[in-house]
Image (tube, rainbow, N blue to C red):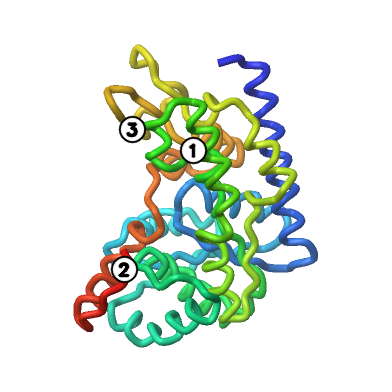
Amino acid sequence: MENINYDATLLNLKNLLSQSVGQATNKLQKTGVVFSAGIDSTVIAFLAKKFCNVCAYTVGTCKGEDIIFARKFEKLNILDTKIIEITEGDVENEKGNILKILNNNNIPVTKLNLSTAVPLYFASKKAYRDGIKVMLSGQGADEIFGGYVRYLKMNEYQRIIAMKNDINLAYKDNLNRDIAMCAFNKISLKFPYMDKNFSDYAMNIPMKFKIYEVKNDQYPDDFGETIDIVDGKKFIRKFILRKLGREASVPEFIVKRKKKAMQYGSMSEKIIEKILKKHSIQIKF
C-alpha cells in the first residue's frame, strides 16, 4: 500500500466527512445519531461532537448485538447514549403507524423494509421527546466503502459498477424509508456520507483502500478479527473507514466490529417474523 497516497487519501476523507457533518449540524446545539455502535454511525457521532452536543440512540432487543455493543460504549462516558430496548409487544403497538408511513410514502411493505423501519421509528420517537430536531445516520457507508459481503465475490471492475449502482439507488432502496420514519416523528434525518463532495471523492479512491485483500496472512493494523473469507481469499471490508475511525478516536472494539445489518444487530427482523407469523400475514420477502 502506497503510504503517501494512502495517508493523503485518509486525511482528505476525514476532512471532507468532517465538513459534511459540520454542514449537517450547522447552528444546532444538539443533534441525535442513529447509533448501532458500528463503525459507520460511530465515526459520524465522533465527528459531530466537535460541532455540537451529541446524543446516540440505539434500538434493539435486550439480546441484540447492537444493544450489547452500545452498553459497552455507554460505560466509556464519551457520549450521551440512549438505549431503547424493544419487545414484540412494543412493535405490535406501533405497527399500525409503521405500516401507514410505508404505504403513505409508496414504500413497498417487505420484511426488509419493516425490519429496518423499526429501529428508525423508535429512535426518532425517543429523540423527538428529548427535544432533538435533527438526527444523523451512517447510511451510505456500505455502498461507498464496500461494506456488503456480496462485493467480495466480485472482481474489481464488478465492484466498481455494483457500488456505483448501489449508491445511485440508495435513496430509492433505503434512505427514503428512513427519512419517512423520522419525519413522522418530526425529525429531519441527514446522511453525511451521502454529501456530494464527500461521496464523489470517496467513490473514486482506489478499491484496495476500501476492500483490502489479505495475502500471506499479513494482517495490516491488527485488523485480523475483521477478516471475511470468500472463495479461499481473505478480505477486510471498509478498511480505510476503520482507519478513519481510529483517527477520530473511535474505541477499538468498534473499529474492529464486523458489519451487522441494522435489522440483525437490533434483532428487529426476528420480531417482525414473529408478528407476521402470528397474524398469518404474507408479504414479499
Q: Quadrant of residue 237?
A: top left
> What residue type is disc 3 on?
Asp
* Mark closer to the chain start, 3 or 2: 2
Q: Which residue is mark 2?
A: 61
Which mark is in front, 1 or 3?
A: 1
Mark seen at residue 146: 1
Q: Residue at x 37, y 32 (%)?
A: 153
Q: Residue at x 39, y 28 (%)?
A: 235
Of residues 79 and 123, the one nearer the viewer is 123
Q: Quadrant of residue 282?
A: bottom left
> What residue type is disc 2 on?
Thr
Q: CA distance from mark 1 to mark 2?
A: 28 Å
Where 232 sits versus 93, above or below? Answer: above
Mark 3 element type:
strand
List x then y, in percent, for residue 238. 49, 36
Q: Which residue is mark 3?
A: 228
Q: CA distance from mark 3 to mark 2?
A: 26 Å
> Residues at badges 1 and 2 in contact (C-beta under 8 Å)?
no
So how many labels did they put on this image? 3
> What residue type is disc 1 on?
Gly
List x then y, in percent, for residue 102. 48, 76
10 Å crowding of disc 1: few (<14), some (14-19), many (20+): many
Where 10 sits versus 108, above or below? Answer: above
Mark 1 element type:
loop
Q: Residue at x 37, y 61 (%)?
A: 263
* Mark closer to the chain start, 1 or 2: 2
Q: Quadrant of residue 15?
A: top right
* Mark closer to the chain start, 1 or 3: 1
10 Å crowding of disc 3: few (<14), some (14-19), many (20+): some
* Left or right: 262, with 205 as reference point: left
> Residues at badges 3 and 2 in contact (C-beta under 8 Å)?
no
List x then y, in percent, for residue 265. 35, 57
